[in-house]
Image (spheres, helix red, strand yellow):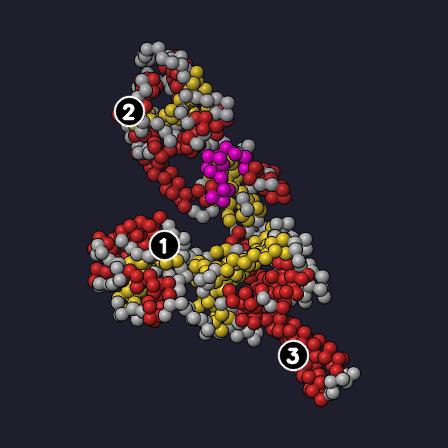
Amino acid sequence: MQKRKRSGKTVVNSLENLSMPRTMKKKKKKILVVDNHQVVQKFMTKLLKDHGHEVVAANDGLSALEVLKSFVPDVIFCDLIMPNIGGEKLCKIVRNMPKLKNAFIIIVSAIAAEKKINLKAIGADACIAKGPFNKMPQYILGVLDGIDKKSRNQLARKVVGIEDVHARQITKELLSSRGHLELILNNISEGILELNQKGKIIYTNPSAVSLIGFLEEQILSAEFRELFDGIHLHRVMELLDERCGGLRSIPDHSPVNLNGKQVSLTVYPVKDDNQDSTVVILKDVSEQKQMEAQLQRAQKMKAIGTLAGGVAHDLNNILSGLVSYPELLLMKLPANSPLAKPLQTIQRSGEKAVAIVQDLLTLARREVAVNEVVNLNQIVTEYLTSPEYEKLISHHPKVELKTDLDKSLLNIKGSKIHLSKTVMNLVSNASEAMPEGGRLTIKTRNRYIDKPISGYDKVEEGDYVTLTISDTGLGISSQDMDRVFEPFYTKKVMGRSGTGLGMAVVWGTVKDHNGYIDIKSKVGKGTSFTLYFPVTRQKLPSNKSLLSVDDYMGNGETILVVDDIQEQREIAVEMLNRLDYNATAVSGGDEAIEYIKKHQVDLIVLDMIMEPGMSGLETYREITKMRPHQKAIITSGFAETEDVKKAQKLGAGKYVKKPYTLEKIGLAIKEELEK
C-alpha cells in the first residue's frame, strides 16, 4: 500500500507524541526563534513553550530585527541560510547591539555537517546541527540546560548533534557554488545592494559598505532612500519606481551624491517564486569626474593661454616705443622742462603695461626659465619686507599675519621673479577676502608623497616643498571653485584690486614649475591654497652650511639602499656616492635579503613602507636572522611609527624622514657607522 505524504502541519502534530526529555524546573527564558522553514519554526516554538519559556518567532533576519526593537531575548536560535538577511549577518548585527551583549546565540543549521562554521567570527556561542526531529529536542534542551548550569564556556564554539546528520553531496555542491559567488561579490569594486519590496536593504557587499560609509549592521534593514536627500533623493525614487519596469540607471555622466561621493546607479528588478526584490549596483565615479574636471580646466587654460600669448607678443612690439622713447627724450630735456612730467607719466604707464604683458606671458606658459636654485622661505621673507607688502597692509590694517616657515626647508628649481609674484598674488587675494579683518597664515613644509593625492589637482608621488597660504575670510562657493584661476574672473573691484590676472599667474607659474595646486574652502570660514613644488638636491649658490661636508663624508663604505620607488633609489644612490660611499639599491625586501645572502654591506638605508611585498620591519627582522649585528638606518615619508620603534629595538639606528637633505642622511649614516 502506497504511503500518503504528510503535510507540514501533520508532521508538527505528530511531534506532540514524541518522548521529549524533561529537565528540572528551570528559570523561564525569553527566546527568539529565527527560521524561514515553517515546520522547523513551529516545532521549536512548541517545544520551548512546553518547557515554560516565552517564545517569539521570526521568518528571517529582517523580521528578526523588527522583533528585536521591542523584544530583548535571553537566547536566540537562528538558522544560517535565510532570505532577507541571513543568519551570519544577523549574528554580527546582534553582537553590535548593546542591549543584546549578554544574549546567547545558538545556530541551528543543517549545513553544520557539510561546512565548517566559524562561530567566533560570526558572533555565535554554540551550534546545533539540524537533523531528524526525534533527535533535535535533546540537543535544544540540552544546550539550554548547559546555559542554566553556567557552563557557557563549555558550550561555546561547539557543534552538537552532528553525529545524527548525514552529509549530502548535492548540498555540498550548492555550498561550494554559494562560496564562489560570495567570493566574487566580496571582491568586486562595485557596490551591490539587494532591496526587498519595501525598499529595505537585505544584502550588502564590502564595496557598498565602503561607499555608504556606515557599518554593515547599520546598513542592513535600513531604508535605501534614507541614504540620499534633496534632488538626489528625488532622482533615486524615480529610478526605483516599479512602474518604469526593466533595467534602469543613473549614468556615470550625471551621478548622484552619496556620502560625499559621486555615484552612478543601476537597478535590476529580480522576480522569483518566493518573493520579488531589487538589486542595486553602485559605482563610485568621483575620481573619474574629478579627472574630467581637471582635464577641462587644463584645456580651458591652454586655450586662454594661447590667446594671451598671441596678444602679449603683439603688445610687446607696441610697448617698446612707449617705454624706450620717453627715457631717451628725458635724457635730452632740461630738468625744468614742462614736458618732463608728461613724459614720466607716459613712461610709468608703459612700464605698468609691460608688467601686465609679463603676466600674460606667464599665463601663456612662455618665457619662464625654471633653472635657478631657490628657497621659498627666502622668497616669502623678502616679500614680507618689501614696499609692495607694506602698501598692501596699509589698505588692510585689520588683517593679522602669522608665518610658520620650516627651518629645514629644502630647495626647489624655479624662477625667483615668478615665484615672488605668486606669493604676492596669493597674499593679496587672501587679504582682499577679509574685508572685516582676520588671520592670514603663510606656511612652508617638506613633504614626501608616498601615494597620489586627489584634490583640486592629482598630486603624484615624490618629494615636494609645499607653500600654504590660508585666510579666515569669505571663502569660495562651489560654483566659483572651477573658475578661480580664469583670467579676469574676479569678485574684486577692477582698478583698485588688480588686473584680474593674479590667480591666472599663480596657476601658470605652478604648472611651469611642474607643480600642483590644492584648494580647500568653505563659504564664510575661509580658504587655503597649497602649492606643491618638486624638490631639488642642489644647494643655493650662497648657502653656507653650519657644518662642512667633510664632517659627514664617507670612506668608501658599502651601503645598500632598499626602497620601492625608483626615483627615491636613484636620489639616494646619487647622494651617497657624492658622500664617497659605495652605494647599491634594490626595490624591495625580498631582493634585499637575496643581496645580503651573497654580499656583505656596512650599512642598510631601509624604507619602512614598501608595497607590495615585505615591509621595512619584516625585511630587517629577516636580515638580522642572517646578520645579527647588521647596521641600518630607517627612512620614511610618514611620521615615526610603531614599526620604526620595533626596528630600532632590533638594532636599527636613526630614523630620517623623507625628503631628506644631504646633511641629514650623511650625519645619520656617519653616526651609525662610528658606533
Badge 2 or badge 1: first in the primary sequence: 2
As drawn, the residue found furthest toward the right would be 338
Within-10-Å neighbours for mark 3: few <14, some 14–19, many 20+: some
Does 426 sit above or below residue 175? below
Q: Position of residue 422 (x, y in %)?
A: 58, 66
Badge 3 or badge 2: first in the primary sequence: 2
Does 591 sit above or below residue 582? above
Q: Quadrant of the N terminus?
A: top left
Badge 3 or badge 1: first in the primary sequence: 3
Contact (CB < 8 A) between labels 2 and 1?
no
Q: Secondary structure at mark 1?
A: loop
- Residue, disc 1: 609
Q: Residue at x 30, y 71 (%)?
A: 580
Q: Position of residue 398 (x, y in %)?
A: 66, 55
Query: Which of the numbered marks, if any, corresponds to residue 478?
Result: none
- Is residue 215 a member of the stretch shown in magenta? yes
Residue 403, quarter of picture: bottom right
Alpha carbon separation for disc pair 3 and 2: 91 Å
Residue closer to the observer: 273 or 180:
180
Does 390 sit above or below residue 66? below
Query: Which of the numbered marks, if any, corresponds to residue 316?
Result: 3
Magenta segment range?
Answer: 210-224
The amino acid type found where label 1 is placed reads: Ile
Contact (CB < 8 A) between labels 3 and 1?
no
Foreground: disc 3 or disc 2:
3
Query: Which of the numbered marks, if any, corresponds to residue 154?
Result: 2
Q: Residue at x 63, y 42 (%)?
A: 230
Q: Residue at x 68, y 67 (%)?
A: 499
Residue closer to the observer: 218 or 150:
150
Q: Quick check: 652 left or right of 221?
A: left
Q: Quadrant of the C terminus?
A: bottom left
The amino acid type found where label 2 is placed reads: Gln
